[in-house]
Amino acid sequence: MARESEDTGMAKASKAKRQRKKKPKENKTRTVHANIHYDNAKGEENPNRHYANNKIKTTKYTVLSFLPKNLFEQFHRFANVYFVFIALLNFVPVVNAFQPELALAPVVFILSVTAIKDLWEDYRRHRSDKEINHMDCLVYSREDKRYVEKYWKEVHVGDFVRLRCNEILPADVLLLSSSDPDRLCHIETATLDGETNLKQRQVVRSFFELV
């Protein structure tokens, strides 16, 4: 009887594990509407209004947040906290070994040099973002009945974009048509994963007959 109850308990446990594994996955599909029907739509009239814009921003700081945020990051390093603590001890007459100003000078110098380096790197990121955001691309306009030039930062979810050969593509796109007879295109993703070899992408199968 003890063996039977043990087997029954194991069977229930394995069944419970299987049920846990079979939990339905959350539906992460998104519905995207073509923007050519909503060129002049504003507010709730545009069904794509909930999606983020295509403006790239990789900078870490703003003018107001630079000093507090940078100091907060620097004091996450134990060495910086330790040396500041030692420097502050020199302001206590009983334990001071050097003049307080001399003790603080190296710490302030290190923090300042690191802050200048971080500021320069962030400025370079800002300049790179601005350059990419202001690159031209061709977006279809229903009013003009042709592709018009826009900045990449002005592209929205649902826009039809015409890509040209060797064009930088700072957006996630779905390939609906290709001038290649086999409906293929080749892309380089070196800026994403460092791989310089060309990758093949094919037109979405649902659009084969429409092209």
Image: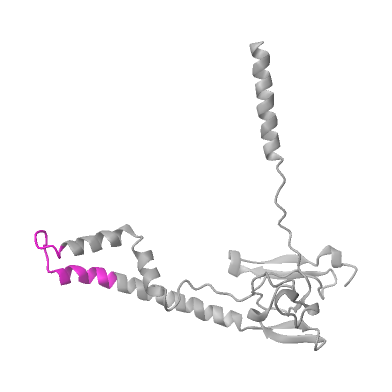
Tell me which corner region of the image, top left, top right, bottom left or bottom right, holds residue 27: bottom right
Tell me which corner region of the image, top left, top right, bottom left or bottom right, holds residue 132: bottom right
Q: Is residue 152 left or right of residue 183?
A: left
Foreground residue among 41 and 15: 41
Residue at image point 46% right, 79% down: 123
In the picture as drawn, the residue positioned furthest to the right comes out as 209
In the picture as drawn, the residue positioned furthest to the left comes out as 94
Quarter of the rendering occupied by the N terminus: top right
Quarter of the rendering occupied by the C terminus: bottom right
Tell me which corner region of the image, top left, top right, bottom left or bottom right, holds residue 79: bottom left
Residue at image point 76% right, 82% down: 39
| Residue 124 coordinates in the image, percent (x, y) | 47, 78
| Residue 199 coordinates in the image, percent (x, y) | 70, 65
Residue at image point 73% right, 62% down: 30
Q: Is residue 136 left or right of residue 41?
A: left
Q: Which residues are the magenta region? A: 90-110
Does the magenta segment cover residue 211? Answer: no
Foreground residue among 62 and 129: 62
15 up-or-down from 135: above or below: above
165 up-or-down from 9: above or below: below
Foreground residue among 167 and 149: 149
Does the magenta segment cover residue 103? Answer: yes
